[in-house]
Image (cartoon, rainbow, N blue to C red):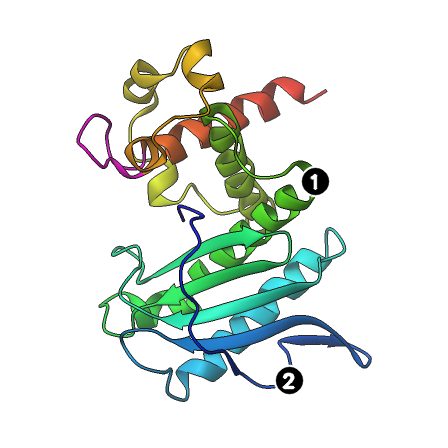
Amino acid sequence: RSRQRGPFLSLNRMGPSFRKLGEQQIWEGHVVSVAVGRFEAPDGETIEREIASAYARIEQHIEAPRLDVLLRSSGNVIPEIGMAGMAYSPILFSVDFDPGNKHFDTCLTDGTLQRQVAHEVHHCMRFAASGHNTNLGEALVNEGLAGHFARLLYDNPPEPWEAALAPDKAIEFLPDGEQLRSPTYDHKAWFFGVGGHYPRWLGYTLGYAIVAKWIAESQP
């Protein structure tokens, strides 16, 4: 979820597409073998079905963008869910899966994968509309908006990373204006707790809370 580009290795087509409108392909799925091995049936079929369902849910609210989706079997996942999404550009995002993770099977079918997809699709749309994060403030808002986009679609409670701290505790870390505008902020520290200066997932929790406050205050 750090949005940093990595090697994709060789691409292998996973079926013709995840979704078609007539003969027009909308989302194209690719499987990339990284470390853990390729997906075995029925996992591949389940992943394809869940991503197609996410597409259909998005289409209920907006016109889904045309995208490529990389599916990677890898250990580079959120341990609590056995998967992790990452957006790279207005037209490309990936989802990594660890089939050996104890949460993998459950999170394939309990809505977690669909919400991961929705989250990353929103990042792709933000890429297209306003570009990538250039400072900490943009990163917080982008993550909060993506989280609330998934909530709009699925009416789900905050994800673990969106509620990592109690509100009164999270507010203690609220950055000041200079920090928010800083183009040299440490993304891994703010969002993943790397270095130990901030709690794990602080950035996601703050972003989600900031957007929640804006939504509440903007209601008529």
- Image quadrant holding the C terminus, namely top right
Residue type, mark 2 in image: Pro
Instruction: In the displayed orientation, state which residue is furthest to the right.
Output: 22
Q: Is residue 198 magenta?
A: yes
Mark 2, other Cα within 10 Å: few <14 / some 14–19 / many ≥20 = few
What are the residue bounds of the magenta stretch?
Answer: 192-201
Prevailing secondary structure class for the magenta stretch in the rendered image: loop
- List x then y, in percent, for residue 103: 27, 65
Q: Residue at x 62, y 76 (%)?
A: 18
For mark 1, give the secondary structure: helix
Give the mark nearest the N terminus, 2 or 1: 2
Instruction: In the displayed orientation, state which residue is furthest to the bottom.
Output: 41
Residue type, mark 1 in image: Ala
- List x then y, in percent, for residue 131: 62, 39
Residue 19, above or below 189: below
Specify whether 5 is left or right of 122. left
Q: Is residue 217 magenta?
A: no
Frontmost residue, 56 versus 203: 203
Specify whether 17 is left or right of 189. right
Residue for badge 2: 16
For mark 2, give the secondary structure: loop
Q: Residue at x 33, y 44 (%)?
A: 160
Specify whether 14 is left or right of 200. right
- List x then y, in percent, for residue 19: 67, 75
Residue 21 picture quarter: bottom right
Q: Which mark is residue 1?
A: none
- List x then y, in percent, for residue 158: 42, 41
Frontmost residue, 182 versus 155: 182
Residue 86, above or below 143: below
Mark 1, other Cα within 10 Å: few <14 / some 14–19 / many ≥20 = few
Residue for badge 1: 129
